[in-house]
Image (cartoon, helix red, strand yellow):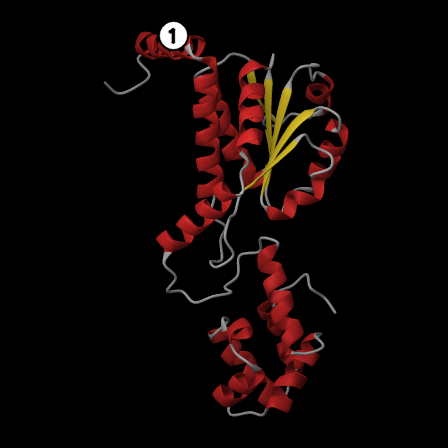
Amino acid sequence: MTTKQDVLSLIEKNYPSLSSSARVIANYLQQHPLAIVSQTSAEIADNTNTSKATVSRFFRQLGYDSHQSAKQAQLALRESGVPIFTQGTSLDQTEQELKNLSLTFEGLRPETLNDISASLANASRVTLIGFRNAYPLALHFRQQLQQVRHSVRLLPQPGQTLGEDLQDILEDEVIVLLGFRRRTRQFKQIVDLLEGRSTVLITDPTGQIYNQQVSHVLLCHLGNESPFDSYAAPMSLISMLCNRVYACLGDEARKQTKEIASLYETLNELEP
């Protein structure tokens, strides 16, 4: 049984070979995709004027053992990061964001945060690595850290390879890896190459597979209720870490921010 495609894609693929009653079910699920995970076989049968047996045959024709198997496959796809509906469209976005933030910050250990903050403040250099949806988070992290300390770099650079930069890792350098679900295949290779280094991984719960290969793991919750992941929690975590680094550096950080502010004025880069 395949779990790489969502149910709607398999309906479209198999539609020409479906019976007339199966097409009724297919049409219903295409118009009400949430029914795949929110309704029972009996409810789907009632809503399509078919029988439970017909619904069961329908899902078997798509390649699943049962409706329950199709439901689990659909939920697993969302867990892996595929944008599909698993709940209704009337979700309270504020409530979901607060839930993600709460779960994220409740799982953070003060001693771990203190260790990471001190490392980010005192390392000879900080390297931030992020691909795909993690890249803009790493870019923002770099911009914030550069406000308070020197020697912060972002990888990968556009259009460049990584070999030379990974070879250039310093002994007392801290590497921050940002990788969320639907990570690139190269991500695992990078984790393997950096094993034994001072590495912090910022990830969602699926990234815990790497927790034996990095120094620290910071888990962020992105939510599964809506089709698309929310990155409010990782951004908030980044803000907290940067504030902690600022506090660790004290006068050195204030001097850096003052000099940068002066350069903004000299270059006339910001609005008055």
Three-letter code, disc 1: Glu
Which quadrant of the structure image shows residue 14? Answer: bottom right
Residue 82: in sight, yes or no?
A: yes
Circle 1 is placed at which residue position? Answer: 259
Question: Which residue is pictured at 44% across the width and 42% down the height?
Answer: 232
Residue at the spot x=36%, y=58% of the render?
A: 92
Pointer 1: residues within 10 angstroms few (<14), some, or many (20+)?
few
Quadrant in the rendering for residue 171: top right
Image coordinates for residue 7, horizontal then vertical, percent: 61, 70
Q: Position of residue 184 (x, y in %)?
A: 66, 42
Q: Nearer the viewer, residue 169 or 50?
A: 169
Give the left or right position of residue 264, taking residue 237 as reference. left
Compared with 207, 162 (above or below) is above
Which residue is located at x 70 percent, y 74 percent? Answer: 64
* Closer to us: 36 or 243: 243
Image-quadrant location for residue 200 = top right
Q: Secondary structure at mark 1?
A: helix
> Which quadrant: the C terminus?
top left
